[in-house]
Amino acid sequence: MDRASQRAQDAWTRINDKPSSISLLRNDTPPYLAAQTVRIEYSIARREVSGAGANTSVRAVTVFGIQGHATVADSDIERHDKFELDGDLYSVVNVNKTLIGEVQALCEVLQ
């Protein structure tokens, strides 16, 4: 198994240790994309945002997906996609697809 395939297999193993299923909304236009299995990790840090005369904190999560796996389709996630998780609506802020074998997306809850 080459390095890229091994990294993709390792990423898939980590995803399946704590899997979540999300359906993404692209361009704010239904229908949602087909559900994808990913791993979601909550950030312990919160970012303060000022607006409308008040400060609020923004909760972030990182979505871990797969790319380049021999038998699993690549995760399809793009900046500005949205998804629901535990009653909150999240927006994808940044996507890193330069990692070998996996995709990481930084997402923030929409208030």
Image: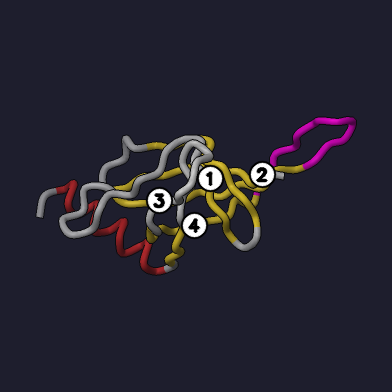
Residue range highlighted in magenta: 45-56
* Among numbered discs 1 and 3, the one appearing first in the sequence: 3
> In which quadrant of the rendered image does the C terminus lie?
top right
- What's the image's color scheme? secondary structure
Pointer 1 with pointer 4, Cβ within 8 A: no
Report the residue at 53% width, 36% height from top. Answer: 93
Q: Which residue, as the protein is rendered here, is positioned at the far left?
A: 1
Q: Hey, what amino acid is under mark 3?
A: Leu
* Among numbered discs 2 and 1, the one appearing first in the sequence: 1
Q: Hey, what amino acid is under mark 1?
A: Lys
Magenta stretch secondary structure, dominant: strand
Q: Is residue 105 magenta?
A: no
Pointer 2 with pointer 1, Cβ within 8 A: yes
* SS at mark 2 in the image: loop
> In which quadrant of the rendered image does the N terminus lie?
bottom left
Report the residue at 53% width, 39% height from top. Answer: 28
| Residue bearing the label numbered 4 | 40
The percent position of residue 69, horizontal first and vertical second, equals 21, 53
* Among numbered discs 2 and 4, the one appearing first in the sequence: 4
Closer to the camera: disc 3 or disc 2?
Answer: 3
* SS at mark 4 in the image: strand
* Among numbered discs 1 and 4, the one appearing first in the sequence: 4
| Residue bearing the label numbered 1 | 82
Instruction: Identify the mark at residue 6; answer none if there is no mark.
Output: none
* Among numbered discs 4 and 3, the one appearing first in the sequence: 3
Pointer 3 with pointer 2, Cβ within 8 A: no
| Residue bearing the label numbered 2 | 110
* SS at mark 3 in the image: loop
> Label 3, label 2: how many angstroms apart (C-alpha)?
19 Å
* The quarter of the displayed image where residue 6 is located: bottom left
User: In the image, is 8 to the left or to the right of 38?
Assistant: left
